[in-house]
Every structure is written in structure tokens, then in C-alpha cells.
Image (cartoon, rainbow, N blue to C red):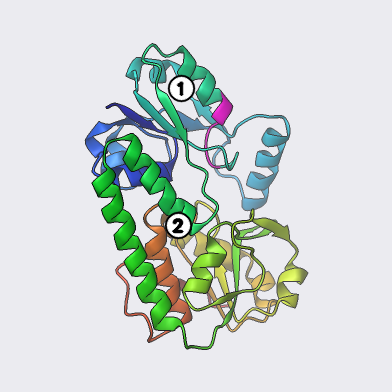
Amino acid sequence: MRIVSLVPSATEMLFALGLGEQVVAVTHECDYPPAAEELPRVTRDALPSGLTAGQIDAAVRARTDHGESIYELDAELLHELRPDLIVTQALCAVCAVSYEDVRAIAEEIDTHPEVISLDPRTLGEVLGDVRTLAEATGRRDAGVALVQDAAARIDRVRLAVRDRRRPRVAALEWLDPVYVAGHWTPQLIEYAGGLDVLGMPGEHSERRSWEEVAVAEPDVVVVMPCGYDAARAHAEALHFGAKLAGLGAGEVVAVDAAAYFSRPGPRLIDGLELLGHLLQPGAIPEVAVANPLVVEL
């Protein structure tokens, strides 16, 4: 089977299912596992480089308001690759190429590839997508094993923190303007022993004001700009240090959102364990992933 992945999280799932050798192309943002970086890219960013957070938000809004994607798809290369399966998503216009564009191109490819759209909103739906991909690719046993391992790790964290005081947490997915994280992130915070004071499980991320975040009185602010690694998240937090300091939280930390929170793939479980270690020190042992960067304000 020849598979093209148009979503970084799907790429991670495919490799986790042991299908790496069948993946023939990925997106320009697929950087995990390292082997994915060696594959042909069928997308490119339509936005110019070097934009600030505010400029990125404005540019994204301008393109999406006009029905334009922020990613460009290399249709000619996609035809040449002759895939049997294309994995994409329709949930977020900012996260991948247009689902409608993918469907239209797939209909013109002589192999008539199946198109699977993964659009999870909750952690349970992310694990459901693992099963969907496993069934579609003949890797059912690998899918069962992956889901069982994830479920066991989730249960270990929830059991370890269940009787502890829950700190109030604000998870900020963007800082200019402010967006509070939704979808699976509030669940991760709850499972990790925290109380998300702004986000709603399974709902879209929402734009809020700095004043609204302050009124929520968070004990911990987790800075997780969508698609940014920990170093860039830390730099963003320092840039908006005065705003963050005004929230009155006892602790502000920056995390690697691209690896552990933005992408609905297997590494969300790493993100859960990281949050558990952050929110409930002592309950969760040191984790193998990069620890949060404390922001000194």
C-alpha cells in the first residue's frame, strides 16, 4: 500500500503502527519520527516566513475568510506518487490543506485512492482514529496494542493524582490574540490532576481577552502556542511577559506544543505525563520527554 499523509499527527500514527515503509510522502511540517523528514513533501506554507504571532493570526484570518488555505498542495507530485490511501483532516483550516481540495484531486488520480479524514475533538476520538487507520491498513493488531498501551498510561496518571488538590490551570494556545486551548487539552489537564478554568473538552479553542484569563485566577499558566516547540514558546512567553505577569499565576511554563499538545497523535500521552509531572510534583515520576521551561517574569 502506498500512503500519503497530509497531517503531521497522521504521519506519527502511521509510523507508530509500523507502516513507515508504506508512507511515500508527507507534509512540510512532518518532523516526527525523524525518518519522516526524509520523505518527499507534497505541501508548502503559503504564508511568508518571519511573521510575528499577531501577523500570523491576521494572515490566517485573511486567507480563511476568503476560502483560501494557508497550505499549498503539490497536485502534480501527488499524481506522480499514485497513492492508494491519502490521510487528511477537515477539522481545522489552519492545520492542513483543504479537505475539499484533497477529495477533488484524489478523484483525478488513476489509482483512485481512498481518502480518510481524521477529525478528533477528544482524547477518546484520537484513540479511535488509531483504530480507524489500523483497520484501513491491515494493522489491526498493532492498533489494538497501541491503544491498550495508551489506555494503561492514562490510567496510571489518573490513579496517581486522583486524591490530590487540583491547581487551577489556564492553557494558552496563542498569545496575540489570546486563545485558550480546547479539544483534547482540557481532558489532558483534568487527567493530569489539574482544573482547566477556561477550556471546554471537545470544543474549539476560543479567543479570550487577557482580562478574562486574569478573572479566571489560574494558579498555573501553560503557554503552548500551536505548532511551536518549547524554545519558541518560551520566547513568546518572554515577549508577552508583562501580560502574563498580570494574570497573577504562581507559575508560568512554556511547553513543546508541536510535539505533545497540538497534534492529536500518540505523543499526546507523553503530553499527559508531562502535565502530570508539572501539576502534581512527586505523583508522577520524571518523564522521558522535554520538561516545561519555567518563565521567569
Does the image show residue 223? no
Categorize mark 2 by other alpha carbons within 10 Å: few (<14), some (14-19), many (20+).
some
- Residue 243 located left or right of residue 141: right
Where is residue 133 drawn, in percent x and y? 36, 40
Residue at left offset 39%, top offset 19%: 77
Circle 1 sits on which residue? 74
Residue at left offset 65%, top offset 29%: 68
Q: Give the range drawn in magenta.
A: 95-100
Quarter of the view holding residue 93 = top right
**Position of 279 relative to 13 (above/below):** below
Where is residue 100 drawn, in percent x and y? 58, 26
Categorize mark 1 by other alpha carbons within 10 Å: few (<14), some (14-19), many (20+).
few
For discs 2 and 1, the disc positioned in front in the rendered view: 1
Q: Which of 135 and 13 is in front in this view?
A: 135
Quarter of the view holding residue 47 = top right
Q: Residue 229 carries which label?
A: 2
Split into 4 quadrants, where in the image is the C terminus? bottom right
- Residue 83 located left or right of residue 227: left
Split into 4 quadrants, where in the image is the N terminus? top left
Distance from Cα at disc 2 to Cα at disc 1: 26 Å
| Magenta stretch: includes residue 96 | yes
Residue at left offset 42%, top offset 46%: 129
Residue at left offset 32%, top offset 80%: 285
**Position of 96 relative to 105 (above/below):** below
- Determine whether the residue tagged by mark 1 lies in a helix, strand or loop: loop
